[in-house]
Amino acid sequence: MSVSQVLEAAVSASRLLAQVPQETIAQLLQQLAKSVEEQAEAILQANAEDLARMPADNPKYDRLLLSPERIAAIAADIRNVATLPSPLGQVIEERTLANGLHLQKVRVPLGVVGIIYESRPNVTLDVTALCLRSGNVAVLKGGSDASSTNEAIVKIIHQTLQIFGIPPAAVTLLPPTRQATEELLTAIGKVDVLIPRGSQSLIDYVRQHARIPVIETGAGIVHTYIDQSADIEKAAKIVYNAKTRRVSVCNALDCLVVHQDVLPRLPVIASPLSQKNVIIFADKPSFEALHGHYPAQLLQPAEPHHFGTEFLDYKMSIKTVASLQEALAHIATYSSRHSEAIVAEDANVIEQFLNHVDAAAVYANASTAFTDGAQFGMGAEIGISTQKLHARGPMALPELTSYKWKVWGNGHTRP
C-alpha cells in the first residue's frame, strides 16, 4: 500500500478502536508486555543489526541500544499503563444552565496520533501503549537507524492486536524514507496531531514543514544551579546523577551554573564526574577553581558555543555567576525550557527559582533525570512537551485526549 492508503486505513481503524472497551485494551496491553518479554531475543537480534550500522561513539548509540534489562523495563512500563485508569469519558466539567440545558465536558481521543522519532525503539512500545489506552491510533515514523528493531517490535504488536480482533492499522509503522516523512507532515484530514521526538534539527524540520498540528517535544538544554546556600555533598550527588546516569537522554545535565561563593568547593562537586571521563568546558573562574583538582585532559576552557548546547555525551559546561538573578538570566538565555534545577538550602532562593524559571519541569534539590513519564507516575510518556499549548512536560494518557461538550435538553430552542 502507498503511504496515503496506509493513513486512510489508520483513519478507519480509529473509528473501530473507539468502540473497543477499555477493559479489552487493558488485557491487550498485559498480553503485549508478556509477548515482548517472550520474544525479547528476536528484538535483540534485530537491534544488533541496527547497532552494527552505527559507530559506538555516536551519541545516538545509547538511545538505540536495547538489552534484556531495558526490554524488561519497557514491558514493566506497558503493564503500568495497562493498570492506569483510561481518561476516556472522564467528565472534566459539568453544570446545568439557568435555561435547563445540562452540559458535560468529556475527554475523548485525539484520533490519529503521528510520532516521528530517531534511534529510540523504546518509543515504539511506549507510544503504542499510551495511544491504545487513550483510544488513539498510532502512526509511527521511526528513523532508518532503528528500522530493523522497529519492524521486529511492530510485528509483535500486530500479533497481539490480532488476538483481540483489532485491525493492525491501529498501530502503523511507516517506511523509514524521506517520502514517508513528507507525506506524514502533510497528512491533512488523516493525522490529527504530530509529535516529533529527537534532535533539535528534527524538531525544527517538522515545525517548519508540517501542515498538520504539531506538539513539540523539544531538545533538552538542561541546567543545574548550585546556590551559595547549597549542601555541597547533596550537590555532588545530584550533579553526578543528572550528568552521567544516561547521557543520551533529553533530561541529562548540560550546564552547571555555580555561585561564585561555591568555587572553593567546586572540586568536590566535579570530582566524581572524572570517574566517567566527563569533559568539562569551564569558564575562567571555574577553570581556575578546578585546575589541579580535575584531570587536565578532561578540563578545557569554555567557548561561547558550549553554552546553549545539548551535548548528549559525557561533556558539560560550567558558568560562574555572582547572584541568583544572574543565574536566572543565564538560564533564561540558553534554556530550551525542558528541565532546570537548583541545589540550595535557602527556602526563599528556592521559591524564587521555582517561580521564575520558565521550564516544563523545575526541580529543587533533585536530579533532572526524573523528567520522565514513568517517574512521574504516568506509566510511560509519549514525549516531554516544551511548548505551552495543549500540554507541557511529560505527556501521558490525559495529554493524549481532547474533549467534547455533551448537551442535554428537553425540547429547548434558542430565542
Image (tube, rainbow, N blue to C red):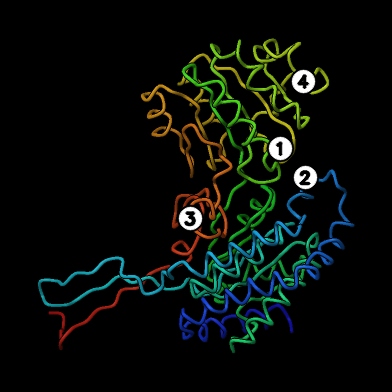
| x 62%, y 36%: residue | 242
Against 378, residue 304 (above or below) is above
Q: Amino acid at mark 2?
A: Pro
Instruction: Confirm or deny contact between disc 2 and disc 1 (CB under 8 A).
Output: yes
- Mark closest to the chain's N terminus, 3 or 1: 1
- Mark closest to the chain's N terminus, 3 or 4: 4
On the rendered image, what quadrant is the N terminus found in?
bottom right
Q: Which residue is mark 4?
A: 300
Q: Position of residue 267 (x, y in %)?
A: 66, 16
Q: Using the image, tell me which numbered label, if any, was put on residue 311.
A: 1
Q: Nearer the viewer, mark 3 or mark 4?
A: 3
Quarter of the figure with residue 165:
bottom right
Q: Which residue is mark 3?
A: 377
Q: Which residue is mark 2?
A: 59
Against 340, residue 14 (above or below) is below
- Mark closest to the chain's N terminus, 2 or 1: 2
Q: The residue tagged with tag 2: helix, strand or loop?
A: loop
Q: The residue tagged with tag 4: helix, strand or loop?
A: strand
